[in-house]
Amino acid sequence: MTGSRTYHDPLHGAIRLDREHPAEALAIALIDTAPFQRLRRIRQLGPASLTFHGAESSRFTHSLGVLDLARRALRELSHFHPQLEQHAGLLYAAALLHDVGHGPLSHSGEEMYGLHHEAWSARLIREHPSLREPLEAFAPGIAAAVADLLLHGRSPNAAIKALVSSQLDCDRLDYLLRDSYSTGTRYGQLDLERILASLTLAPDGNLALHPKGLMAVEHYLVVRNLMYRSVYNHRLNVVCNWLLNRTIAVARQLGPQRVWADAVMARWLWQADALGLDDFLGNDDHRTGYHLQRWKEEGPQELQELCVRLLDRRLLKASDVSGLPRERRLELLALAQRLSEQAGLHADLCCGLQSQKNRGYHPYRGGLRLWDGRHLTALEQRSPLVQSLSEARESAWLIHPPEITVPLRAQLALEASDGAA
């Protein structure tokens, strides 16, 4: 089959794939498979649309964007290192399929169901005929190579690996741009052209950056930090993820005698360790959302309460307890539980603690390097700004019902005044 295909992307414009180019023909074949088309039914940002109403983009859209950026990056690097072109098939396949193993609601689904998308991506690539066969027809052994790259970070070429998975990979570049666009925030405006133009190879063959791109990369790392603080770890996202986790946990606890589920969802809930490929691919945002709707209408009271909060957006509150020691956070959780019970609520369905640590840059986890043709320097050694982003920062939230907000936050205000004193 000859000809080309064009995807019109809101960020990257026309993404044109040409079947005359073997690696691009492979990409078209992979896009047309059922496992990849399923990504149209997986939201990129999970339940974030309850906070940012425009956050409706899919993993399908994101994966096409990653492919486009990988192709552009390879084009830049190949001007000076044409030997990289031999890895185009591996790079394009890994860029496209890096998220094919995501469960419903993306990262939220990983927490809800207790799975890891990298492991499922690798398994699907190795075992699903519609993915494995076009890969093996392109080059024998490439299916295993793509799976190893995505799951273990192993690749015959260090620069190709870095374009797929590193602190400046095509995945991160696309999701920061795309998530900023879809959520209506303005933090994710990157100087993408300068970043791509500054890509080079260090003497050891690994990916590096020309110093002319230093400020663009500093900006990228600041943007990433701001996006985590303002979008990914937004307090209402934390609340929605907590509610989703509790919903699945309660459904599993109540068991199949009390909770309706179709055959696929029943295996996800109560036989998750034995999921087959078809069972895995059978669950997406549509199926999970349908079960939430059914449970809201006719499930046990505990499930109804949780699903009403999610589907009707009667969300819980989240109060910032980041500045308090763990022991005090637990005491405040106990207080919230007592106040909730006194208000006639089920404390285990409306009270919780969530915390996470974020680091804007990891200097020792594949840290970025600058190469000007003579000197190879760690990025943080040239940039005090990047050095400042290396410090881990914890955020912690006390989740509670709106009914107890006044007395609970009055106690938190006392905590703050005691700390100031």
Image (spheres, grey):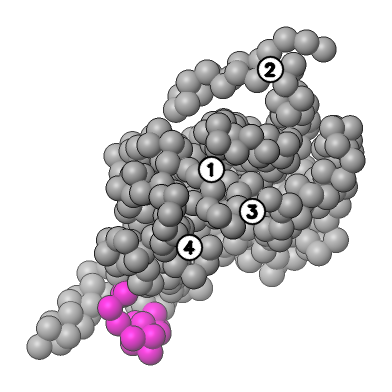
Q: Is residue 316 magenta?
A: no
Looking at the picture, which amino acid does disc 4 mark? Gly
The mark nearer the N terminus, 1 or 2, is: 2
Q: CB of mark 4 within 8 Å of CB of mark 3?
A: no
Say what secondary structure mark 3 lies in: helix
Whether residue 55 is situated above or below residue 217 in the rendered picture? above
* Numbered disc in front, either 3 or 1: 3
14 vs 41, left or right, is left
Gap in Å between the C-alphas at discs 4 and 3?
Answer: 13 Å
Gap in Å between the C-alphas at discs 3 and 1?
Answer: 15 Å
Write the residue at 82% across / 43% down: 142
Residue at numbered disc 1: 170
Quarter of the image where the C terminus is located: bottom left
Write the residue at 60% across / 49% down: 159
Residue at numbered disc 4: 367
Gap in Å between the C-alphas at discs 1 and 2?
Answer: 21 Å
Write the residue at 18% across / 80% down: 416
Say what secondary structure mark 2 lies in: strand
Residue 348 percent coordinates (x, y):
51, 73
Residue at numbered disc 3: 158
Specify the segment rendered in magenta: 321-335
Residue 81 percent coordinates (x, y):
60, 38
Looking at the picture, which amino acid does disc 1 mark? Cys
Residue furthest top in the image: 3
Residue at numbered disc 2: 18
Q: Is residue 332 magenta?
A: yes
